Amino acid sequence: MVIEIDYSEVTGKKANCPEGCGMCCLCQPEVLPEERNFFRTKYPKNLVKSRTEDQHFALAMKKGKGSCAFLNGRKCDIYQNRTTFCKQFPFHFYVSDRIRVEMDLSCRGVWDTEGADAMEQAKVLAEASERRLSKALVEASSVYKEFYSICKETGVMCDVSQLRMSVSENISSFTNLGYVAKVLNQSLEEPKMSLDGITPDAKYDEKELNEAAMEASMGSMGSDDPLSVPVYCDKDFNWNMFMANGNTIEWAIMDDDGELHHKGFVDARDIQLKEPDEEGKKVLADYIQILNGRDSFLGNVFYMMDDLGYEDDMGNTYYGAMCVTIIDLLWRASMLDHFFGFGMGAEGMKEAIIFYDMDRLDAPTIGAFV
């Protein structure tokens, strides 16, 4: 079976693995069936059942919460025998009714101008995983076919290409909090909304929008399990963890042995949602364009529609999800500014995307990453 893959997100990009980073080693990798014998034979204590719902085999993490057990001195002890999932990072093959390559922008190496051609790297990885991709495509296509059928029956179906085009035509507007507030409100209030004619709301309820942004961000921080909370790998490759307890966010740094070292606290209610400056808006607009083209973002929208029983129009859900994503990102940028003083310019937005994108790619979908 010849499979076609969309490489548009990685076309013209570079991907480098920065020495001393180890960010990807905080993600517990699945061990495929054909890889298990090696670990059962050589490292039986480091082959464990994951804590996820599907209970697949994975590599052990230091003290059950730190980096991969094979990471020492920020180098992999089994690099030549690392798992397929280790090799694929920062590339993700998202399978829906087609296959598309997406690139994890939480990896600092994809922001480098140096490095190997990302598309060529992705093609090599795709060839090595062709059998699994083909199998997943058959399964995911069936799910998508059923989903579209239900959408048509319930009257909530929209032309996906038109939704994406309308967002693309209004990219710069989506960097304006007044516009985001207006779109978000209409997505909740109108039975079938359109972006046509929407202008920024100069008198939007700042408190209400800030609370919505805080709620979106705090949802992912509300765990005491370091494997489940957002990680920000800073410029010095420190692994910064942010954990919420009530309205309090604790900032800690995880060391190479899996121990957490407290750095500070902040009351989440003291973080005020800030709008980026003009240079920051350019970086944000580029990221919105990437999200707008990602099939995994669309798959998350479809997951929400299914979870809510197909009550809302696809357009409303799509535009609403985009707005929630933007305010979540901007609230995190505001939090990073509180702790690190990055500001809301180009640097602040870049660092916020590095902090955020891994969580965005981890959102539930009706498709699958392979």
Image (cartoon, grey):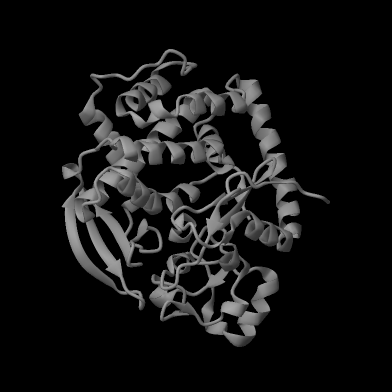
Quadrant, the C terminus: bottom right
| Residue 319 located left or right of residue 341 | right
Identify the residue shown where x is 44% and y is 70%: 22
Residue 223, placed above or below residue 61: above
Say if residue 311 shows up in the picture: no
Residue 360 rendering spot, x and y as whole percentages: 45, 47
Which residue occupies the extreme top position in the image?
A: 197
As drawn, which residue projects farthest toward the front?
114
Q: Position of residue 95 (x, y in %)?
A: 65, 47
The location of residue 302, given as percent across then percent down, is 56, 35
Residue at image position (58%, 54%) is 92
Q: Is residue 99 left or right of residue 204?
A: right
Asked if 13 appears above or below 270 in the picture, the reply is below
Which picture quadrant has residue 148? top right
**Residue lying at 40% horizontally and 59% vertically, measured from the top left:** 228
Q: Residue furthest right?
A: 1
Percent position (x, y) of residue 352? 34, 49
In the image shown, does 87 or 368 lie closer to the viewer?
A: 87
Q: Name which quarter of the figure residue 293 lies in.
A: top right
Left or right: 93 in relation to 281: right
Which residue: 44% across, 72% down? 19
Question: Residue 133, relative to residue 42: is it above or below?
Answer: above
